[in-house]
Amino acid sequence: MRLVGLSILAIASSATAFSSSSTTLSAIPTRRSTSLSMALTLYGSPGSRSPLVNWAADELNLSLETGDLSKNPHPFGQIPCLTDDNSVVVFESGAILNYLLSKADKKDDDARSAAVGSWIAWANASLDPICFLETPEGKVYDRSEEH
């Protein structure tokens, strides 16, 4: 997963040709300090798109607690789902990634936030079929279950 994350950052960093503003994604550091002090709980599993959220939290230096799946607040019981201590519930990996970025990076200008949001949407739409194989039941194939 780390390799995929670094690949997305490399793609985003080379996106300056697609940006008409002076704000580029090449300014995105791989590690940053954040003052986010709220508790974040992720309801997920390795056999879902939850690792995307784990990766983003790691890149943003955010701590995630693992939620009890029997208490998952997603309206349809799906994963991933994220909650914070302000009773916010966010589901769908792309929405969670945007939420984490908005909470962790208060200094973003509109152009940079829009660019990052665009790359998140692109990655979910274009890389998803490459990175996640689905079972006939529509679940993400989990190779850890092979052993």
Image (cartoon, grey):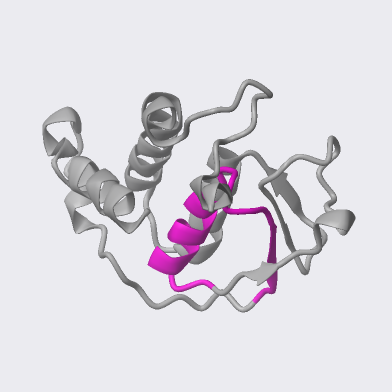
Residue lying at 24% horizontally and 42% vertically, measured from the top left = 12
- Residue 99 rendering spot, x and y as whole percentages: 58, 51
Nearer to the camera, 89 or 108 = 89
- Residue 63 rendering spot, x and y as whole percentages: 56, 74
Residue lying at 54% horizontally and 39% vertically, measured from the top left = 94
Q: Which residues are magenta?
A: 38-62
Count of labels shown?
0
Apparent side of residue 49 relative to residue 138 in the rendered image (left or right): left
User: In the rendered image of this protein, does residue 116 appear above or below residue 30?
Assistant: above
Apparent side of residue 37 relative to residue 143 in the rendered image (left or right): right
Res 65 visible: yes
User: In the rendered image of this protein, does residue 88 appear above or below residue 120?
Assistant: below
- Residue 114 rendering spot, x and y as whole percentages: 39, 38
Query: Which corner quadrant of the image does residue 79 belong to?
Result: top right
Nearer to the camera, 99 or 66 = 66
Apparent side of residue 83 relative to residue 51 in the rendered image (left or right): right
Res 23 visible: no
Magenta region includes residue 43: yes
Apparent side of residue 1 relative to residue 72 in the rendered image (left or right): left
Residue lying at 76% horizontally and 64% vertically, measured from the top left = 67
Nearer to the camera, 110 or 69 = 69
Residue furthest top as drawn: 136
Nearer to the camera, 41 or 137 = 137
Magenta region includes residue 58: yes
Residue lying at 37% horizontally and 43% vertically, measured from the top left = 116
- Residue 66 rendering spot, x and y as whole percentages: 69, 67
User: In the rendered image of this protein, does residue 47 appear above or below residue 39?
Assistant: above
Residue furthest front as drawn: 147
